[in-house]
């Protein structure tokens, strides 16, 4: 096992001054564990490779000075001291300039809390990062206006500031907030994948609602999720709601477990409300079919941000069905839902519906708990969840004498439903005789 102490000792012994840096040091000072270890060193990439030639090495950006060393499972990202570099075409880096001193390297880093270096018990803290950790402040290293500007690295800092503030429970220092606000258009320099990666960290973090509010506060929400921003201040005129559409959505978001599909669904579930709103004869707000509009808005936005197909599908299912809990769950309806959605999505749906109800004037989630109870009962009985679990196959139906083709499929579908929703025993003889009966009846209908 190659420990971080050994990594540092090897580099130092070879004559290259080296330090722990970045998130590891920040987290350590906050009393948190961090598995992600970044090391800064005076050694140049070829020299790093030489020092660790007996280990597995991945070149993850030798041109920028970063080498990953893998020592028995633990990875170390080792980066040569360097100066802040500008991005030539605003997206791709131009030339990297290596530096001799750790202080120069710390100067290029984004926030004071990330501009710390540690070797043994010696903390290098030229920008007051330790104090900012204590005071829970995200502050730019140097002038925020210069630090947040036109290129990929600099624009990314805006999203990183929000992410760190939301996930650590910190505030963004005032001038840095202003700088982010003034530069909101620079978001365009960050690839959508990279934007989504930061958003995911915010959404999966301990306080996603705060993250969304911070995005709004620094003027980024309307750029990233305009449909979410459009819910701000939207009065629902509804006796069921005491919050406006935006605050309600954030309360739902807060109420869901840390799961990306569930949280994205929570954020978008009511985005279709403004477009479907009308006042009924009693003067109450109605939103018929809003789930469909919300679904379309979410799909479009998530596609634009290049989310994986599976996530988009799951989010869309959850949004489309978030209103289903207005019907009382029965064992049969849960069984049907389980088969349609699968275990993971039905659980997510219950989580979303629970959070949704708890964010209204109604606080009664007995229907959801009933649904969960039925789900458990069904799963405990080892249900047939798909056609391949049935005790008979299409081949068996054909061997009963029915012609291969649509008829066989039809018979199997009926059997599936009977087994799955009506508790018919999944037993070969039972199913064969049912197949024969259904088949003969259908045959007669068609041919008589
Ligand atoms: P975590 O790994 O918990 O997300 P981290 O602070 O380690 O947090 P990384 O993305 O791993 O974040 O980056 C490592 C370090 O590199 C940061 O602590 C920071 O010092 C520096 N850094 C990363 N991105 C930027 C940037 N866009 N501008 C300036 N410095 C940056
Ligand atoms: Mg890190």
Image: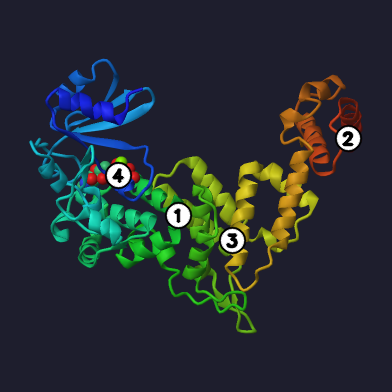
SS for dot 2: helix
Disc 3 Cβ-to-ligand 1 distance below 8 Å: no
**Residue 206, disc:** 1
Q: Residues within 10 Å of mark 4 (few under 14, many from 20)?
A: some
Query: Mark 4 — residue?
Result: 23
Relative horizontal placement of residue 435, taking residue 169 as reference (left or right): right
Labels 3 and 1: the sequence-earlier one: 1
Q: Position of residue 304 (x, y in %)?
A: 39, 49
Q: Quadrant of the N terminus?
A: top left
Instruction: For marks 4 and 1, give the CA distance.
Output: 17 Å
SS for dot 3: helix
Q: Is residue 8 among what the camera can see?
A: yes
Looking at the rendered image, the disc whose residue lies closer to the viewer, 3 or 2, is 3
SS for dot 1: loop
**Residue 355, disc:** 3
Relative horizontal placement of residue 156, taking residue 404 as reference (left or right): left
Q: Residues within 10 Å of mark 3 (few under 14, many from 20)?
A: many
Quadrant containing ligand 2 reads: top left
**Residue 59, disc:** none
Labels 4 and 1: the sequence-earlier one: 4
Relative horizontal placement of residue 425, taking residue 106 as reference (left or right): right
Q: Position of residue 143 (x, y in %)?
A: 13, 59
Looking at the rendered image, the disc whose residue lies closer to the viewer, 1 or 2, is 1
* Residue pictured at 25% horizontal, 58% vertical: 132
Q: Quadrant of residue 225?
A: bottom left
């Amino acid at each position: 096992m190659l420990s971080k102490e050994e990594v540092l000792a090897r580099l130092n012994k070879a004559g290259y001054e080296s330090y722990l840096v970045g998130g590891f040091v920040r987290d350590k000072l906050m009393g948190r564990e961090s598995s992600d270890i970044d090391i800064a060193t005076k050694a140049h990439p070829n020299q790093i490779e030489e020092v660790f030639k007996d280990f597995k090495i991945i070149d993850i950006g030798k041109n920028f000075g970063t080498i990953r060393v893998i020592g028995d499972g633990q990875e170390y990202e080792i980066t040569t001291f360097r100066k802040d570099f500008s991005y030539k075409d605003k997206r791709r880096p131009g030339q990297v300039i290596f530096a001799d001193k750790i202080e120069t390297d710390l100067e290029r880093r984004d926030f004071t809390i990330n501009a710390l270096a540690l070797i043994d018990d010696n903390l290098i803290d030229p920008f007051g990062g330790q104090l900012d950790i204590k005071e829970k402040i995200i502050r730019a290293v140097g002038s925020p206006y210069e630090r947040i500007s036109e290129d990929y690295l600099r624009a990314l800092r805006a999203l990183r500031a929000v992410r760190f503030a939301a996930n650590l429970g910190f505030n963004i220092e005032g001038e840095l907030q202003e700088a982010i606000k003034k530069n909101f258009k620079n978001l365009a320099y960050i690839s959508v994948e990279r934007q989504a990666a930061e958003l995911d960290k915010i959404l999966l973090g301990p306080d996603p609602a705060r993250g969304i509010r911070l995005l709004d506060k620094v003027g980024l929400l309307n750029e990233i999720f305009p449909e979410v921003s459009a819910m701000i201040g939207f009065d629902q005129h509804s006796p069921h709601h005491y919050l406006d559409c935006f605050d309600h959505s954030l309360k739902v978001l807060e109420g869901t477990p840390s799961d990306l599909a569930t949280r994205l669904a929570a954020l978008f579930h009511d985005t279709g409300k403004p477009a479907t709103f009308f006042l009924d004869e009693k003067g109450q707000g109605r939103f018929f079919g809003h789930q469909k509009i919300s679904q379309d808005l979410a799909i479009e936005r998530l596609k634009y941000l290049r989310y994986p197909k599976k996530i988009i599908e799951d989010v869309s299912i959850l949004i489309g069905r978030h209103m289903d809990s207005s019907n009382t769950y029965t064992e049969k309806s849960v069984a049907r839902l389980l088969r349609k959605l699968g275990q993971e999505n039905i659980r997510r749906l219950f989580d979303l519906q629970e959070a949704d109800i708890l964010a209204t004037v109604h606080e009664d989630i007995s229907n959801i708990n009933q649904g969960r109870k039925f789900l458990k009962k069904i799963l405990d009985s080892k249900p047939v969840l798909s056609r391949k679990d049935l005790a008979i196959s299409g081949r068996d139906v054909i061997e009963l004498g029915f012609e291969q083709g649509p008829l066989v499929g039809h018979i199997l579908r009926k059997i599936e439903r009977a087994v799955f929703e009506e508790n018919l025993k999944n037993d070969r003889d039972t199913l064969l005789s049912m197949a024969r009966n259904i088949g003969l009846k259908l045959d007669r209908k068609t041919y008589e």
